[in-house]
Image (tube, helix red, strand yellow):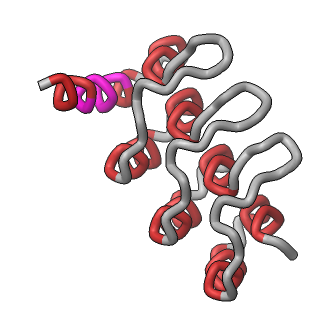
Amino acid sequence: MDLIQAVILGDVNKVKKLLEQGANVNLRDRNGMTALMLAVRKGQISVVKLLLEKEADVNAQDDFMGWTALILASALGYTNIVKLLLENGADVDIKDKNGMTALKYAIKNGHEEIVKLIKTVQAKTKT
């Protein structure tokens, strides 16, 4: 079992073991999605935390749509994961292949708490 499979299964212990054995924390699936993106997509906050602790690239973009972990979390409404990604340096200004940012997806999908979080980060970076 590789890291991608362990993340898809949500097996925190296996993910931890693979990372301890030197697995590439930024491993990608055939669509260019990183382990972090897959964990975010499944809402697996404990796996997300573990990958971030191992310095997963928080701003990596997938090959298909140019999505980041933050864009996925914002679109899906995972407020706690958005907070975690922002605390770990997620770039709120990255656009996907359609020119959409995490903020635009949060607005489009009605995730008001996430909109507030992202706007707070934007305000801090502009001062």
Indicate the position of residue 13 as horizontal and vertical percent values.
65, 82
Q: Quadrant of the N terminus?
A: bottom right
Query: Is residue 41 toward the left or the right of residue 79 in the image?
Result: right
Indicate the position of residue 42 as horizontal and vertical percent values.
67, 49
Quick one: 79 or 96, which is closer to the camera?
96
Quick one: 74 or 53, which is closer to the camera?
53
Q: Residue at x 52, y 12 (%)?
A: 108
Is 109 placed above or below 66 here? above
Q: Residue at x 45, y 69 (%)?
A: 53
User: In the image, is residue 45 part of the stretch drawn in magenta?
Assistant: no
Q: How many marks?
A: 0
Q: Quadrant of the C terminus?
A: top left
Is 46 placed above or below 66 here? below
Indicate the position of residue 20 as horizontal and vertical percent values.
62, 86
Indicate the position of residue 76 as horizontal and vertical percent values.
58, 32
Is 102 placed above or below 49 here? above
Majority secondary structure of magenta residues: helix
Query: Is residue 21 toward the left or the right of residue 30 in the image?
Result: left
Q: Which residues, given as a range, are shown in magenta?
A: 115-121
Q: Residue at x 74, y 45 (%)?
A: 33
- Give the image quarter of residue 99: top right
Quick one: 34 or 103, which is closer to the camera?
34
- Give the image quarter of residue 18: bottom right
Q: Residue at x 72, y 63 (%)?
A: 7
